[in-house]
Amino acid sequence: MDMTSSNAAPIEVITKTQTRKRWSAVEKKAMILESSEPGQSVSAVARKNGVAPSQLFYWRRIMEEGALTAVEANEQVVAISEFKALKAQIRQLERLLGQKTVQVEILKEAVTLAREKKLISRAPLQGLDDLR
């Protein structure tokens, strides 16, 4: 048996601790699209790129849900429950802002009326000049 056969895969010896690889959204998308091509398997694409197949399956699932779009735009992805809570809070704040706007308008009218009454009260009363 020939040990120098070209069919033998090279063995990689890891001599130091490796840090996790960070994949960009473009790289993830390319791997996902490659694994979706006819005749390709997720395991083969994952092995070729040094990614765990489960990780590639996860990326495929979140891409289907639209999360990679946010990642490409450098936006934070939030849970739908958090999104709904924030949306409800916005509605509540808009309602409060509307109430405060009405209060401000009422107070402006009150100040205008009070100033008009003050001017009338400062005007000399008719008939009082004759008493002096």
Image: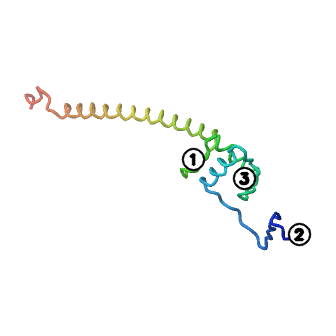
Tag count: 3
Residue depicted at 73% across the width and 59% down the height: 50
Q: Relative to 10, does residue 58 appear above or below in the rendering?
A: above
| Element under disc 1 | helix
Q: Quadrant of the N terminus?
A: bottom right
State left or right for residue 19 relative to residue 108.
Answer: right
The kind of secondary structure element at disc 3 is helix
Question: 63 or 39: which is nearer to us?
Answer: 39
Find disc 3 in the rendering and name its residue: 45
Quick check: marks 1 and 2 in contact, CB under 8 Å?
no
Which is in the foreground here, disc 2 or disc 3?
Answer: 2
The Cα–Cα distance between marks 2 and 3, rounded to whole angstroms, is 30 Å
Residue 42 is left or right of residue 99, and the answer is: right
Q: Identify the secondary structure beneath mark 2.
A: loop
| Residue positioned most to the top | 127
> Could you classify mark 2 by the number of other residues whose Cα lies within 10 Å: few (under 14), some (14-19), or many (20 or more)?
few
Identified at 68% across, 45% down, the residue is: 37
The picture quadrant where one finds residue 38 is top right
Find disc 2 in the rendering and name its residue: 2
Residue at coordinates 73% horizontally, 51% vertically from top-left?
Answer: 55
Are circles 2 and 3 on residues that touch, CB within 8 Å? no
